[in-house]
Structure formats: structure tokens, C-alpha cells
Amino acid sequence: MSEEFHEYLRARASEGPVAFVSELDAWMVFDRALVIEVLRDADRFTVDDPRFSTGRVLGPSMLSLDGPIHSRHRSPFADAFKVGGPGSISRQEVEAKLADRASVLVDGFRQRRHADISMQLAAPMAADVMCDVLGLVGVQTSELLSWY
């Protein structure tokens, strides 16, 4: 990601633990403890927002569901996402893999000079991570996305 993007996020975060981002017409939460509180409070907050939901790209999944149905979808995969859990990789390894994948995808945007961020960045990044986490060797990103 560009330094300009990181500067933008730092500026929003300096406004406080929660800031309204007019460009997104949405609130962003920057404090980790508050993020966890928001993610765990399905009565007051939802991930199912038609403007941003991964459900528009991938269909209903643990990323676009709240409350008990989210937990049901998430529980088979939870251990793989825990640092130090069975089959998990370190945070640094995850960050390095994501940075590498993002660079490749963004380089493709530069060549085309346009991009659909949902379909050409968010969906492939999510599918690639899931392939790694679930140990789906030899499964292509496009194949995994077609399962949705």
C-alpha cells in the first residue's frame, strides 16, 4: 500500500479512536479494543452493510454475517487464525504474504490503469489467504471464488 494511504489513515486515527470518513460516508474505528467490542456486539453493529459487505462479492460467509450464524460459520476455521494455533503462521508471515499479493494485484491495476477494487483486489486477497490458511494446495483463486 502506498505511503499516501497510510498517511491518510494516520490522519483519521489522530482525530480519535473513532472518526467519520466522509469519502466512505462511514465511521472507522481505530482503537483495537473498540474494534473487538464492535465486532462482538451484533446487537448494535453489523458487518452486513450493502455498501461494503464482502457478501456482495463472495456471498454470505463468516465475513458478512453477525451473531450466532457468524459463529457457526467461523468456528471450523478459528484455530487456523489464532497466532500459535495449530497450523497457524506468524503475524509477520501473514503481513509479508499480504504485502506481496497486494503488490502483484496493484501492479496489474497500473498496467490496466483502472480496477474494480472489490473483484480485483478484495476477493482475490481473501481467497488467497483462505487457500493458505486452509491448506488448499493447488486450488486456484478463481476456483475458490467460484465455490461462492
Image (tube, rainbow, N blue to C red):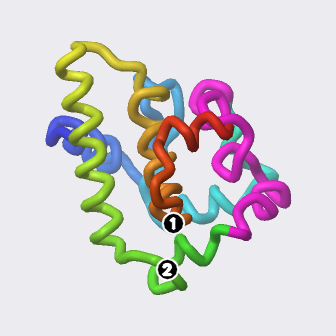
For label 2, the SS is loop
- Give the residue at x 18% y 39%: 2
Q: Is residue 143 visible?
A: yes
Picture coordinates of residue 22, whole percent (x, y): 43, 25
For label 1, the SS is loop
- Give the residue at x 42% y 44%: 125
- 119 above or below 143? above
Could you tell me the amino acid type at mark 1? Gly
Name the front one of labels 1 and 2. Answer: 1
Picture coordinates of residue 128, whole percent (x, y): 44, 50
Extreme top residue here? 113
Residue 19 figure quarter? top left
Tag 2 residue: 87
Quarter occupied by the N terminus: top left
Tag 1 residue: 135
Q: CA distance from mark 1 to mark 2?
A: 9 Å
Comes first in the chain, label 1 or label 2: 2
Q: Is residue 18 visible?
A: no
Picture coordinates of residue 15, whole percent (x, y): 35, 46
Extreme front residue here? 138
Residue 76 figure quarter? bottom right
Q: Is residue 67 magenta?
A: yes
Quarter occupied by the C terminus: top right
Could you tell me the amino acid type at mark 2? Gly
Instruction: Determine whether label 1 and label 2 are within 8 Å by CB.
Output: yes
Q: Is residue 111 magenta?
A: no
The span picked out in magenta is 50-76
